[in-house]
Amino acid sequence: MMNLGNVAASSTIHIPWSSFDSAGASVTTTGFADADIEIYKDGSVTQRASDAGVTATTDFDSATGCHVITIDLSDNTDASFYASGSEYLVMVNAVTIDTQTVRFWVARFVIGPIDAQVTGIDAGAITATSMASDCITSTQLGITAVSEISSGILETNVTTHTTANTVGKYINDLLADTAEIGTAGAGLTALATATALSTAQTDLDTLTGSDGVTLATSQPNYAPSTAASLATAQTDLDTLTGTDGATLATSQPNYAPATTASVAALNDLSAADVLTSALTEAYPTDGGTITVASGLYAIMQLLGEKAIAGTTLTVKKVDGSTTAMTFTLDDATTPTSVTRSG
């Protein structure tokens, strides 16, 4: 039987075996199949229930009498059968060799890391790919190794470490900065006193409020204008001075101071200016106040441009088609009163 020793979890192992006749010559085997391979775990008499992941190869590479068993340890058809730390025995059960039915053990292996005392390792033997991610844990190291490693780091004199960007150099720089503070904080005497800090806090509260927020509307002496209030102020200023920012100019007629000539012109109106100037057509609203123009137009059109339909009297504008006003009569044939309705 072949002892494969420790094998990696989820790996694939290959177990070679040979068959001979009674005279010692190599002969093939009859009926060697996957089902003829039995695998036992930790000395149990119950073999693996599934043949999945197990392959029987007769006459490997056409070599008579040379056979191979391949076992895929990552196959989990029989759940949790392959487990780290367990021992496995492999048997070939009931095959025919030289007309004889035979059974025999072919291999033994253990899944998991090797437990051994190592006195030497070849250079380059340990690499990132050759070591499993969990091959060295606190369990393997033990409390003594952990203690020795921590002591080696924490009790090393770091003042001799001067290489830039190393932990030792950073600690040295920190110690140097700490020395500048001085014994018992002597280097801190230049810092502000509690009284000075309190005065500064009072001044800050005056500006921002005791809640510490930025200049707020509750601080009227210092509160900055909002964007909206600034925009309103700018609009009002433009109305007074023009968008060019100049002082009150004649180009701003609403606010430009009157000149002597403009005042004299107001005192020089003639009858023709008043009586012959065309009026803009307008009509008073129902129940509203009137102007000279709207009153005159309403009277003129009521007298000369109207139509009666039933109890509705409609007054047209000067164009003769657009409705200017509407009135309601108290009777369609013999009205005695009329009321503005529109």
Image (cartoon, rainbow, N blue to C red):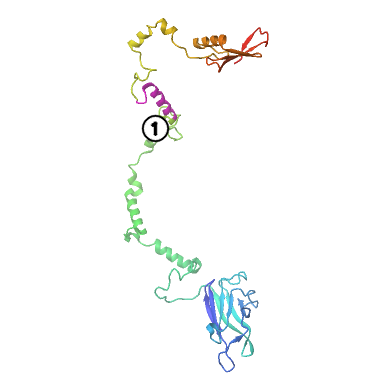
Residue under the point 55% across and 76% down = 110
Q: Quadrant of residue 12?
A: bottom right
Q: Residue at x 37, y 36 (%)?
A: 196
Q: Quadrant of the C terminus?
A: top right
Image location of residue 143, percent across then percent down: 48, 66
User: Mainly helix, strand or loop, the magenta region?
Assistant: helix
Residue closest to the far top: 271
Q: Read off the residue under disc 1.
A: 203
- Assign a secondary structure to mark 1: helix
Give the amino acid at mark 1: Asp
How far from the left and from the top, in percent, is residue 264? 35, 8
Residue in the foreground of this view, choosing between 209 and 253: 253
Q: Which region shows up in magenta? A: 228-244
In the displayed structure, 296 sits above or below 196; it is above
Is residue 89 part of the magenta span, yes or no? no
| Residue 227 vertical placement versus 317 (above, below) | below
State the residue lying farthest toward the bottom: 23
> Where is residue 310 shown, x and y percent of the image?
66, 14
Q: Residues within 10 Å of mark 1 (few under 14, many from 20)?
A: few
Q: Is residue 241 in the magenta section? A: yes
Query: Is 155 on the left or on the right of 294, as rendered?
Result: left
Q: Quadrant of residue 208?
A: top left
Of residues 1 and 244, the one nearer the viewer is: 244
State the residue lying farthest toward the front.
Answer: 320
Above or below, 339 against 200 in this view is: above
Image quadrant in which the N terminus is located: bottom right
Instruction: Give the x, y percent position of residue 8.
Output: 52, 73
